[in-house]
Amino acid sequence: MAIYSDVMETIEMLEKEHLDIRTTTMGISLLDCFEEDGDRTARLIYDKITRLAEHLVSTADTVSSEYGIEIVNKRISVTPIALACASNLEDWLKYAKALDRAAGEVGVDIIGGYSVLVQKGITPTDESFIESVPFALAETERMCSSINLGSTKAGINFDAVKKMGPLIKKTAYLTRDNNSFGCAKFVAFANAVEDNPFMAGAFHGIGEAENVINVGVSGPGVVKTALEGMKDATVDELAEKIKITAFKITRAGQIVGREVSKRLGIPFGILDLSLAPTPAVGDSVAEILEVMGLERCGAHGSTAALAMLTDAVKKGGLMASSSVGGLSGAFIPVSEDNRMIAAVEDGCLTFDKLEAMTSVCSVGLDMIAIPGDTPEDTISAMIADEAAIGVINNKTTAVRVVPVYGMKAGDKVDWGGLFGAAPVMEVNGFNSSGFIRRGGRIPAPVHSFKN
């Protein structure tokens, strides 16, 4: 009887509660592809990705069909491309296009790793790479880019921070015919992790193996349903229920991920249990907070509720797998969560409240549309604030904002698919340029000195 109950519960999770494997991401080291000749490097990049990932999509589809659990996205992450040390824009774009072509050839949805790590300082190569990013994002379809500009150990590289506003605004302009969508493929990090399977920030860290399979699991609808019948429960009882539910979700992801890994003959890396919403009704992190008793996500108490949710999800995941990694917790991307969109439209969820909530979520300010005329220094200041939250609290934080060219606060933009739609949010209009343009580096916090 217990087995029958477990089977029926799993079927309910799959059919009615939006349980899915959000992504199976193959990590590929490209360290042996980087040579002095740009054409040869681009060719080696393309050849290695297409060889190693040739069967990724078909294998994931087969496992998905056999187990009855949807794998929504198949993705690839690669070694940070800035390590290729190109000396000119032409070569950087060759590498970006090689990544994009390879992703198209093997049929994955997205490829990440057009990335650079500059948390402590910027080399001339890094400078050249950063200048290439807007063009690379504009001239590719599937390729994502990221930068790590701060860490608890190193502090915050303000020289990098002040470059971010101009980079993002230029990307918005170059992709203005597509609602500035290029910005949705770029994220600025503090404390970036090397085994993250989620985009836009995935890259294959230099401490990783030659080739691995990382899996990202998601199930906001499952957690929401589990809490719906607990109207009189205390918050600790809610936390326990979330933990148990996260355990079940993680076990499902572990089984599927290891099976894909086994069939491809590639080591299993990590399982990232992050409650990642989609635009679908019933697949929302904000709804979980509302089921807990908040009238709207963004009301006072939202940060506390999100903190409890994130912690309980991580505890459940750690119980279910010895390979939990990546980010793990709960994402709050505005455009990808229908109830967050409603909260913004109602005026309950503001930019500043979102920033407060990022102190306890998986990552940070994610998929937020802002007015196209937002000043460059204001965008850099948003990134500085978010990096500070991450560096001081020893957690990963990130910013993925889209200044939609030609749009103002209150307008709505629709990118379709998993990227969803979003109201353009109002931002603080006061000037930050005097602070941002100072450059330099904010020193590491006192608690970073642990050696």
Image (spheres, rainbow, N blue to C red):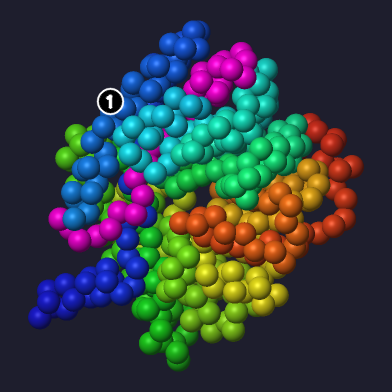
Splitting the image into 4 quarters, where does residue 41 fall?
A: top left
Quarter holding the C terminus?
top right
Residue 345 x/y as whole percent:
66, 73
Quarter holding the N terminus?
bottom left
Report the residue at 57% width, 35% height from top: 137
- In the picture, measured across the screen, residue 444 lies left or right of residue 50, that is right
Identify residue type, mark 1: Arg
- In the picture, measured across the screen, residue 28 lies left or right of residue 1, that is right
Report the residue at 45% width, 63% height from top: 278
The answer to whether 287 is drawn above or below residue 253 in the figure is below
Splitting the image into 4 quarters, where does residue 133 fall?
A: top right
Report the residue at 75% width, 63% height from top: 409
In the image as oriented, which residue stretches furthest toward the front?
Answer: 177
Q: Which residue is mark 1?
A: 51
Residue 368 x/y as whole percent:
63, 57
In the image as oriented, which residue stretches furthest toward the bottom?
Answer: 232
Per the image, is 362 magenta? no
Q: Which residues are magenta?
A: 66-95
Splitting the image into 4 quarters, where does residue 364 fall?
A: bottom right
Residue 428 x/y as whole percent:
81, 59
Front residue (pair 408, 368): 408
Report helix, strand or loop for mark 1: helix
Front residue (pair 32, 423): 423
The answer to whether 294 is drawn above or below residue 144 in the figure is below
Residue 99 showing in the rendered view:
yes
Front residue (pair 119, 40): 40
